[in-house]
Image (cartoon, coloured by chain):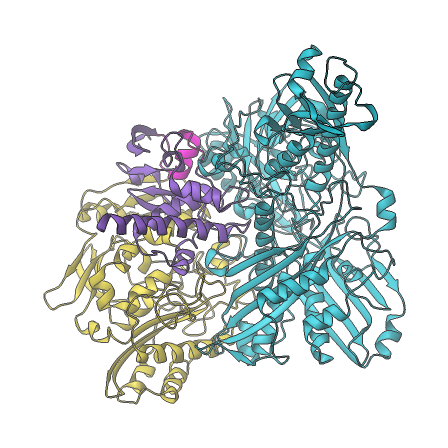
Chain colours: A purple, B yellow, C cyan
Amino acid sequence: MNHSISLTVNGVRRDIALTDPRVTLLDLLREQLDLTGTKKGCDRGQCGACTILVDGRRINSCLALAISHDGASITTIEGVARGDELHPLQTAFIAHDGFQCGFCTPGQLMSALGLIDEGQAGCDAERIREGMSGNLCRCGAYAGITDAVLEVQQKLKAEKERRVA
Amino acid sequence: MKSFDYVRPASIGEAIAAARAPGAAYLAAGTNLLDLMKGGVSRPDRLVDVTHLPGLDTIEKLPDGGLRIGALVRNADLAHDAAFAKAYPAVAEALLSGASAQLRNAATVGGNLLQRTRCAYFYDVASACNKRAPGSGCDARGGDNDMHAVLGWSDGCIATHPSDFCVPLVALDAMVEIEGNGGRRQVRLEDLHRLPGATPQQETVLEAGDLIVALNLSAEACNFASHARYLKVRERTSYAFAIVSAAAHLSLANGRIEQARVALGGVAAKPWRAREAEALLAGAEATAQNFRRAAEAALAGAKPSGDNAFKIELAQRILVRALALASAGTPERIPALPASPFSIHSGALHDA
Amino acid sequence: MTPDIRLNQAPAHQRHGSNIGQPLTRRDGILKVTGKAPYAADHHPKGMLYAVLATSSIARGRVTFLDIAAAKRHPGVVDVMTPSHKPALAEDQDAKTNPFMFKMELLQSDAVRYANQAIAVVIAETLEAATEGAALLAPQYQALPARVGLDADESFVPPAVGLGHPAIVEHGDTEAGLANATYAIDATYETPAQYHNPMEPHAIIAEWDGDKLSIDTPSQGMAMAQMRIGGLFGIPPENIHIRSPFLGGGFGSKGLISGPQILGIMAARLVGRPVKLVLRRDQMYGPVGHRSPSRQRLRLGTDAAGRLTAIEHQARIVTSTFDDFYEPAADVSHTLFASPAIRTAHEAVRIDSGTPLFMRAPGEATGSIALDAAIDEMAFASGVDPLEFRISNDAPVEPITGKPFSSKALRECYAQGAARFGWAGRPLKPRQMRDDKGFLVGWGMGTATFPALMFAGNARALLRADGTGAMETGAHDMGQGASTALAQVAAEGLGLDLDRVEFKSGSSDLPDAGIAGGSAHTATVGTAIHNAGAAVIAKLADLAMRDERSPLFGAGNAGVVARNGRLHRRDDDARSEAYADILTRAGLAEIEASGTGAADPAAQAEYAMHAHGAVFAEVKVDPDLGQIRVTRMIGAFAAGRIVNPKLVRSQLLGGMIWGVSFALHEQAVTDGRSGRIMNANLAEYHVPVNADVPSMDVLTVHEHDPHVNALGIKGVGEIGITGSAGAVANAVWHATGVRPRRFPIRISDLVTAR
């Protein structure tokens, strides 16, 4: 049985023929669309390595059937930088050494982008830690991750205040 | 994962018709169902995808002042809905203490009500499990069972219901709106889940094709908004299932409790409404001693189902704590670590 | 084809003088934050098929039936590899010609020796089809009762433990020391089986071309993997090209190539197409190693002044029924504390599990949590503050061998760590401190230690006429930052700015860099790089000094110094010449030289070599509910020369988090009846999440070590766990008065103790 769906992936509309309804968004990205930045750590919603944004919200792509997301707009790690220009969060992750092996990093970054957009954590380190707890990092780079997100939040806040003033 | 037919109905009527077929299952976000399918625990022949059904993703104010929450409202959206969080703060806190931000962004209200147990023997398809394979036995008995039920369990099943969300909901007399073959009906959440008895595979009162379309909370339930807490003990600060949890709602007048709405999580196959505790608390003073008496009453019928006697004591203590926190007043903002014992006050607990 | 990997140089590096010692950001940072870093499973050669393991649900017995027809009927399934349908191997799966060659399960029979063992491989056009094909095999078994747990069988004394150390070591008379002690403790601790769980599951993409094999797979030891694969398939190791530019964590589990990786290669041979095989998370619990559980009994005694009179550390560990690896848990008691009598003894039990293997700080982590707890108990029993106790019992020389330490700044670690933490004024008795919200507060500490090991590694240095250089070594970056730190050593050795050095690693066609393990990679490969750099500079200097057109002509005995791409006369800095000019004039496009790194046996015979540290932890515990939160941790470490403080800090922090995890979180739970691990996932096998990790800080204490190797590097990959696990455990005791003797500490332990 063939199903065709259409997705907007990193701003580009893609019409996709799904030969199997069992395909998850994660496997679609990695195995069919050659977008391998999104990682599979557990495939069961328990590690966060596969985090992507779907219609602007962070979710675990391993627990999302592609066929159910017909029409969705998806952002993956490949769509975060603008050309050679890194997103401030990416720069902050490098500066704060918010990773070691790097395998969880795309998921951490997508999760952090989602967290910033959700607007619940602000510049509160404790809320950032809680909000980033859906992304395991076995190397233990949590301190750098928290510092990186906090720095970007503080910059955003300062920018907002400047604009208001 | 077993191959399945994928059906995307255009209406609730079509959905119900499609889902009545043997081997059919509803698919909402899939955060639980896909996990079960990947593990071979669930092997449906047909998935009826309800996520595109219109009109099920809104939160509406009811004429009597209560709220009607569409079954497809996402957990995160509900928790962050300002009116909802103000009216039912313990429910919002419970929602935010469950799973991870990613899962809460996907998971739906209706799906969460039907979350399956985390019993390892249910998940392990090589183990005997009366819930997964009726009549096969229960390997959790005599196995690794320190997380299992202490209330309402049977010889056939000692699994617990893992939802955080359902615990304060059941205390607040939430109603589940169900559409099925015979039309629309309302069922108290407390009556939705069944205790295992001899038929642990029958987890709810839903029948083939029944679709949860909404959850209703009454205006009366808002009366507890200023004294409401949900508390959860777990082995990890976040992203972990509860060992036990408690929801406490009080209405207070002059230091005296008018009414209490109390429930426990992680102790039984269903979210456990503690009516004995409520009865003792009604009219009593809000004192530690009375909280302890209420907690003892709530667990009076408890007995260990394995290596989990500690949960009986722990459940009493968490209920005492939840009552104390509720009587102290709902925090202005949901704490940084929702439902954590370390979140005594709102805002950050520890300096970074 | 080696992937084209461009490393970032940004954000701009600030260097002051030496390349070594600078806190540079990771050179692979941009690749990692953009999703462009290629991990093994990201590759997709043309025509690739997917292979999925079917694994056993019994722990012991044999497979009697597989429904191969059902699997093959599933659309997309291409083939099913089983014991009766598989390519031939040139070597027995159980061949063991050296102690570090571990037996594998390669479908050579229907026997099952542990739960989650591979029993078939399904190969299909899609991942979905292969996965369901494996489920459809619905195996039937003839099962025998599983033997699991530390008491499954009679114990025996293993022939050796760890890297070939004696199982029993006796120094002095411990019984006399205990009998004459004024104060004594006798405590037994249990630690669980733990699984490495790198975020990247083991993966392999294998492609055959005749008798040549090309694979992408994460490896902490490519040359050893080449040898192993070559032996199994009967092909020369050089026919095998392994690419492993990025590992998504290893922690020891990727040190040796594992059975499932070999099965991927076999599957590719069977179907004659490239095959990708990635372990599911649950399949990581069995065939790729784990940390043995342990039961450790410690008996300690002191005199009236609190000086140790005896240390006895007995450890019971497990190994598999079919192979031998013995976690050297008690050996940690050999080196830290001065005692006239020390006895360590291991006993082992064979159980139906996969063979335990090296997991980050094998032995040291397991043993140190027990030793740190016992020292804490001993200090309390003798009425002495644990810090004071540790300082007064600190070993000035290695106690058993009597060797001096090549360097040991442990006392400075104690002092600086304690000062930063604010240890002074800690009440001796437990359950004395509360915070303003009523939570119990406890402070605990532990002593960190890890041997400064060296293995063998090689590097090749090149200098080019365009003024650039290159360093080539088959090193492994599993997250520790080898591709940054080693490039710094390379730039230093070549006398070039880092931007002018091409650093190549992560591929088996480069010089053998040994194994990334034992916290020895930077020291070993760094030394090789240092020597290769010196050798190529010597060649260059020779060219210049023998050429009368060079300003360095005749520098002869005075010699030259390499700096910033120029050679300078040592006796006259103003006389210098650029590398490029020297090579151009000599008509050479490039020159090269090799270097090796290995332990110096003479230095090892003379000195005891260890890194050390002191870890301080604060925990808060809910007095009623027993929930624990680590709120502060300070680790002070002395590990010789620090190549890159930024990366070292990250590694030490990561290790400390593993310590928290050891004390509070991770454990595999095995069903005693079936032998299956009931939490083979990441939801119930807890590793710390972000919210578990408190405010943490790391101090690196200056330590100059002229003996350990030419660069003075000791290694930091594993030491962070040691001391940390014990510090947290001791803090929980100090908060609650409940002495944890079983790890991880459970809420139930604290609730029932009250």
Res. C744 visible in picture: no
Residue C45 in magenta? no
Tell me residue B312's x, y (percent). 47, 77
Identity of the residue furthest to the top in this view: C587
B267 left or right of B256 in image: right
Q: Residue at x 72, y 47 (%)?
A: C714
Q: Residue at x 18, y 74 (%)?
A: B220
**Quarter-wise, where is residue B78 in the image?**
bottom left
Tell me residue C574's x, y (percent). 69, 26
C13 left or right of B285 in image: right
Instruction: Give the magenta range.
Output: A18-37
Residue C749 versus residue C567: which sits nearer the camera?
Answer: C567
Quarter placement of the N terminus of chain C: top right
Quarter placement of the C terminus of chain C: bottom right
Tell me residue A51's x, y (percent). 40, 44
Residue B314 against residue C65 in the figure, above or below: below
Residue C417 against residue A158 in the figure, above or below: below
Tell me residue C679's x, y (percent). 54, 56
Residue B168 against residue C201 in the figure, above or below: below
C306 left or right of B346 in image: right
Q: Residue at x 74, y 48 (%)?
A: C322
Residue B86 versus residue C485: which sits nearer the camera?
Answer: C485
Residue C419 against residue B125 in the figure, above or below: below
